[in-house]
Image (cartoon, helix red, strand yellow):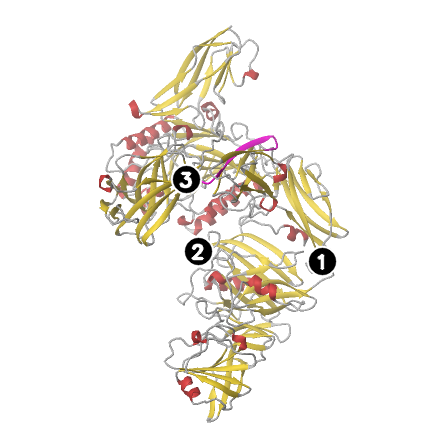
Amino acid sequence: MAAAIAALAVTLLPSGPAVAAPSTGGGGLELSRAVQPLGPGTELTSLQSLEPTGWRSAHAVTIDLTAGARVESVAPDDVSDAAPLSELVRDHDPGPGRATVAAVNADFFDINGSLAPLGPGISGGELRHSASDGAPTEAVGLGPGDTGRLLDLRFEGTVLLPDGVAPLASHNAARVPAGGIGVYTAGWGGADRALTVPGAARVTEVLVREDVVVSVSERAGRERIPPGATVLLGRDAGAGTLAALAPGDGVALEYGPRTGDGGPLPEEAVGGRGLLVIDGEPQNWEGRPNNTAAPRTAVGFSRDGGEMFLVSVDGRQQHSGGATLTELAVLLADLGAYTALNLDGGGSSTLLARRPGDHEPRLVNRPSDGAERPVPNGLAVTVPTGSGTATGFRVETVADPERAPTADPVPGGHPGRVFPGLTRALAATGHDETYGPAPARPAWSSARPAIGSVGADGVFTARRTGSTTVTAGRGGATGTVELTVLGALERLEPTARRVGLAGPGESAGFGLLGQDDEGNSAPVEPADVTLEYDRALFTIDPDPAAGGFTVTAAEGSDGAAGEVRAAAGGRSTVLAVTVGGEESTVADFEDAAEWTFSHARAAGGITPEPAGQDGGGALRLEYDFTLSTATRAAYATPPGDLPVSGRPQSFALWIDGDGHGGWPSLQLRDAAGTDQVLRGEHITWRGWRQVVFEVPEGIALPVSVHRFYVAETRPDAAYTGSVAIDGLTVRTAPEAELPPDGARSGPLIGAGREVAAREWRFAVVSDAQFVARDPDSAIAAAARRTLGEARAAEPDFVVINGDWVDEGSRADLEFAREMIEEELGDALPWYYLPGNHEVMGGSIGLFEEIIGPARQTFDHRGTRFIALDTSSLTLRGGGFAQFQQLRAELDAAAEDRSVRSVVVLSHVPPRDPTVRPASQLTDRMEAALLERWLADFRRSSGKDVAFFGAHVGVFDSSWRDGVPYVIGGDAGKAPAAAPGEGGFTGWALVGIDGTTGARPREGGARGHGGGGGWLSVQTRPHVDALTLDAPAALPAGGAERVAATVSQGTGAGAREVPVAFPVSADWSGSRGLYVGPPGGAQRGQVAAFDPATGLLTGLRAGEVTLEVRVSGVRERVTVRITR
C-alpha cells in the first residue's frame, strides 16, 4: 500500500512505461490510473483517459459499506440554503470515534430561486423535504443496516379540516404542485415562500401552531416560520381549500415519506435524476434530454448494496470535456455498479477526499466554475478513527507537481526529478491503520546512496544520474517515493523572463526550471538558488509548495524596474521585474477615412463611424465571408504603420461586435521587419467591448501597428457582418533591459558532411503554399526549385510535410501532384502529408483522392516512419483511430527487432518555438500526450525516436525528454521569423545510421554530442549569393569575428541570412588552419576558427584560407596572420 500512497501526486499526463494503453469501457484509451486509500474499505481511484469524444478526467470513491464505512447526507440547517461542499463537511459531525474521508455533491436544486433541493431528502431517519413539483422521486437511500439502494421516495399526507380531509402534496419542497397544498416548517429556512408558487393565480397561506390556525393570508410569507409552527401553502385549487379556514379553527396534519416498492424507509436519502445503470446494464441516453458532454456526479451500488460508488467527472475544461449520460452509465457499470443514478452535475460537481495522514478531506476534482459552487446537500463518507499510531507514511515532494515550474505544454511539473549536486525537499506525513493522522518523525534513507542521499531533514541531495527509492520509516511504518536524477544541469531559465507587478504591495510568482543536455527538465529547489536583486525595489521570498518564489513590490517602487540574477548548480539566468506601467493612445480613428480596406477571399469596405465608443469618431469595417470556405480576412490598414515606443505589455481596442464569432487580430511589425499577429477573443458579443491583445515576451523592439483585421477560419461559417473599432491603446512597462540568451544551438542540425557520412538520407520539404491559378508565380518557382535541389541530393525518398499548396482546391492538389512528378521523376519515392492548407477547413477526402492516404506507416532500412494527419491543426481531427494507430505503431515498433528507430512525421508540431507560439497543435493536451508517448517509447524500448514537423515558418530543433524535435521551414512562402531566428526559405536533408537500439543511460538521457548519435540534419537554405567577411590581416594572439551571410533574392528586398544555427554550414580551410576552439590546435598551425563562436584566432605568423559551404555553394577568404 505504501507504493500506492507514494504515487498520489500525479500530473494530468504522468510519464509511464511505453506499453499498450488499456481500453476504457467507452472504447477510449486509459492514460493514467492512481489509487489512494481513504480509510477502511474506502479508496479513491483517479482516471485520465482519451475517449472518442474527448479528454476525460474522472474520480471514483469505492466504499465497502460492510467494512465500517458509512455514508450520510450533509446539508445546511435550512432546506432553502446552500454552501460549498467543503463547508458542509466541515460543519458535519460524523459522530464519536468517526472521521469524514470523502464527500460528493448530491441533488439538483432551485439554483436561481430558493436554493432548495428538487428531489426528496431524509436525514437521520427524518424527512427534510419532498420532491419539488414535477421533479423525479428517484433517490439514493442508505440503510437500514449496512447497505444502500436506489429507490422511489414519495410523499403522502392529509390535513383534517373543519369540513373534511384534504390531501397534502409536498413538504418543504422547492415548488408546491399545481392545485396542491404544501407543508412548510421552521426547517424550510429564510427563503421567500412566494418562490415556491410561481405563476399561481391564487395563493393562500395558513399559519398553524399546536393544531390551531393562527392566521390566514392571501400571499406567501417571507418571514421565517417560528419553531414549532407549521405553514400550509396552497396554490389555485389548494388555495381555495385553505381559504375557508379562519383563525382558531382546528386542523390535524399527518404526512410522511414512503418507498415506491413498499420497502423500509432509508435512514439517509438524497434525490437524483436519471437512472444510469439498471440490473447491471448501462442505459443508452441517446435522443433523450441532457445527454451532452458535461461535468457529472453520480452514485451507484453493487447488486447486494454492500458496495457503493461515488463518481465525479470534470468537464468544460481543457483537460476534460466531461461525459454524456450514456458515457457516465458505461463508466459506472465498468466500476461494478448494478444500479446507478445521476446526481447534479455542471458547476455543482464536487468531490472531496482525504489524503492518508490528513485531518480533513480536500477538493480533488476541478469544478468547471473554477471554485466550489454552493450546493444544497451532499453525501459524506465516514469511517472509524484509528489508534493514532503511525503504521505508514505518505511521502512526496514539498513542491506540488500541479504548481511546480514546468516545461510541459500543460500545467504539471516534475519535482520527482533532480539534477546532480542539487536537492529536493521531501515531506513525510504519518498515518495510522485507518489512514487517519498519526504524527511521527521518520528516519530517511536512500536505496542507492551513490545516486543520492537524504538527510534527517528530508532533503534529498542528488549525486549522479540514475533512479533511487527514498524511504521514510519509523519502526514498522514506512513510505516511499521514487526520485530520478537527470543528467548534469546545462541550462537554467525562469518561468517568466519578465514579471510585471501592477503597483507597490502587489505580488506575483515565478520559478526556475533546469534542463540537462537532452531537454529533460525539472524545477530547481528554491533552497538551491542564489538571488541577487535590489531589495529597495522588491522582496523575493521562497514558495516551497509551488517550487518557486513570490516577488512583492516595495512601497515607493511604482514605475521602477530591476533585474534578478539567479544562480544554481553552476548555471545562471536573469529576469526582470517591473512595477506599474503607462497607458497611451496609439490610434483614435478620427482619421478613419484615410484607412484602406483589403481582404483575403472576402469582400467589404471601410467607412468612418461618427459615434464611436467615446462619442468621437471610429472606424467601421464591413465584410462578406460568404465567398469561400477557406480562411478569410478583412483588413483595415492605416495610412502608415503606427509606431509604438517603449516595451508594450498589451494593446487594448474597443470593438463594437456583431456576434458572428470572427477573430479580431492586431498585426504588428517588429524591429526585424517580421509580422507578429496578436489575437483577441472571438467576437461573440454585440455592442461595445474592450478587447486586450497580450504581447508575448521576445518580440524584437520597437514595434509598430501595421493593421487590424477580422479573420474567419471555420469552413462552415458563412456570413456578412460589420464591426466598429475605436480607442486603440498600449500599456507599456518600465524599461528593463535583459542580456541576450546567448548563441542559439540545437541538436541534430549540423554540417553537411555529417549528413553525407550517414548510411542513408531522406529529404524534407514543406510550406510552399502556391495556387494553381498562378502556376508561374515566384512561390511556385520556389517550390519547383526546392524539389529540384532535393532530387539532386540523391536521397532515398522525399517527405512533403504539408502546406505545399495554399487553398486545397482540386486544381491546387492536381497541380501539386503534377509538379511533384515532374520535378522528382518516376524513380524517387515521395510521401506527402497533409497540412491545414491542403484542406483549408474542408474534408480530407479530396486530398486522399488526388494525392493518397492522409496518414500512413512505412519502414525503410530499419527505421519506422509514422506519418500523421494534422490537417485540422489537431490529432483528433484525423479521427480517434489516429491515436489508436499511433499507440499501436509505437508498441509494435518497440517489440519488432527489425525496427531500430522511429521517426514521427506531422505537419503541425506539438510546440511552436517562436515568441508568438500560434503555429502548434491547438489542443495542448494532445501536444503533451504526443511528447509523453515518444519519451516513454525511448525510455522503455531503448530505441531511438525523433519528430519532424513544419507549419511554423522557421527552421529549428530542440531536445525534450531525450527526444529530438526538428521543425522544417518554408520552401516558398515568407518565413514567420527574422532570418537569424530560422526565418529563411529552403529545405532539409536528413541522414540516418542503423542503430543497435542501445538503451539510454539510466535516468532517461543519452549523450547526443553534436549529431544525435544516429541522425543528423542539414538545413539547405536557398542560396542566391554567399558572402564571407573576414579581416585581411590578424595579429598572432588576436581574435576577430568572421561572418558568412546567405542572400535570398536580389536587390534591396533580398533576405540576408546569417550563417549560424539553424543554418548548416561546412567550414574548412588550408593546412595551417584548425577548425575548432583554439585550444585544440596542433603545434605549428597558423590560426584557429571556431564555428560555434564565429571567432578567428591568430596563433603564429603565416597565411590561411578559410572556406564556407552552404547548400553546395562555396566562398573563401585568405587571412594573413602577423607577428
Which residue is more in the foreground, 260 or 209? 209
Return the disc, 1 or 3, that comes first in the chain's sequence: 1
Image check: 664 left or right of 92? left
Q: Residue at x 40, y 49 (%)?
A: 877
Q: Nearer the viewer, mark 2 or mark 1?
A: 1
User: For the residue carrying disc 2, how many other residues have a C-alpha within 10 Å: few (<14), some (14-19), or many (20+)?
Assistant: some
- The residue identified by callout 3 is 582
Q: Is residue 907 visible?
A: no
Q: Amino acid at mark 1?
A: Asp
- The residue identified by callout 1 is 432
Q: CA distance from mark 2 to mark 1?
A: 42 Å
- In the rendering, at what x and y percent does residue 410 appear? 50, 46
Q: Is-magenta flag for residue 574?
A: yes
Q: Amino acid at mark 3?
A: Glu
- Tally of marks: 3
Return the disc, 2 or 1, that comes first in the chain's sequence: 2
Residue range highlighted in magenta:
567-582
Q: Residue at x 26, y 51 (%)?
A: 721
Q: Nearer the viewer, mark 3 or mark 2?
A: 3
Q: CA distance from mark 3 to mark 2?
A: 46 Å
- In the rendering, at what x and y percent does residue 530 appear? 61, 34
Q: Dividing the picture into quarters, in which one does residue 211 lie?
A: bottom right
Q: Dividing the picture into quarters, in which one does residue 218 lie?
A: bottom left
- In the rendering, at what x and y percent does residue 403 appear? 55, 47
Q: Is residue 411 visible?
A: yes
Q: Amino acid at mark 2?
A: Thr
- The residue identified by callout 2 is 53
- In the rendering, at what x and y percent does residue 119 appear? 49, 73
Q: Secondary structure at mark 2?
A: loop
**Main SS class of the magenta portion in the image:** strand
Q: Which dot marks residue 720?
A: none
Return the disc, 3 or 2, that comes first in the chain's sequence: 2
